[in-house]
Amino acid sequence: MFCQSCGREIAEPATVCPNCGAPVRGIAPPGTSSWKPVEHASGAWYLLPLFFGIIGGTIAWAVNRDKDPGRARNLLIFGVLWTVIPTVLIALAVFFYYAPAPRAPVP
């Protein structure tokens, strides 16, 4: 067996490398694997924030945060932006619609 830190050969029962002191990690026996396939969240989750905005984004994030954290974060951001951007645009439209028109100067 070899140290994964320094590469020196070490005895089988060792728990730390005698050369560098790094802990020896257990090695799985041949034919076994500790690798697990990553589960990705479905793209259909984007429908929730699309229809329900920030609330849908929060729900989609809560459901997917353990399974696929990257997509869960994107769902939350999408829900927030899908709520904030239209709100700002509507507020600007209302402001400019009701803003008084400039008057011509009186001579």
Image (spheres, rainbow, N blue to C red):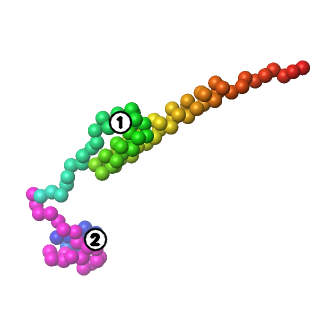
Check the image and report above or below for 38 versus 89.
below
Q: Position of residue 97 (x, y in %)?
A: 64, 24
Residue at 22% in and 69% down: 25
Residue type marked 1: Leu
Residue at 60% in and 28% down: 94
Residue at 27% in and 44% down: 40
- In the image, the segment drawn in magenta is 10-31
Residue type marked 2: Cys
Instruction: Examine the structure image and report whether residue 20 is included in the region drawn in magenta.
Output: yes
Badge 2: residue crowd in 10 Å (few <14, some 14–19, many ≥20) = few
Q: Quadrant of the C terminus?
A: top right
| Residue underneath mark 2 | 6
Q: Mostly what secondary structure, the magenta segment?
A: loop
Q: Which of marks 1 and 2 precedes in the sequence?
A: 2
Secondary structure at badge 1 equals helix
Residue at 58% in and 32% down: 91
Q: Position of residue 68 (x, y in %)?
A: 30, 47
Q: Is residue 51 visible?
A: yes
Quadrant of residue 35 within the rendered picture: bottom left
Mark 2 vs mark 1, foreground winner is: 1
Q: CA distance from mark 2 to mark 1?
A: 50 Å
Badge 1: residue crowd in 10 Å (few <14, some 14–19, many ≥20) = some
Check the image and report above or below for 53 versus 103.
below
Quadrant of residue 13 within the rendered picture: bottom left
| Residue underneath mark 1 | 48
Q: Position of residue 4 (x, y in %)?
A: 25, 67
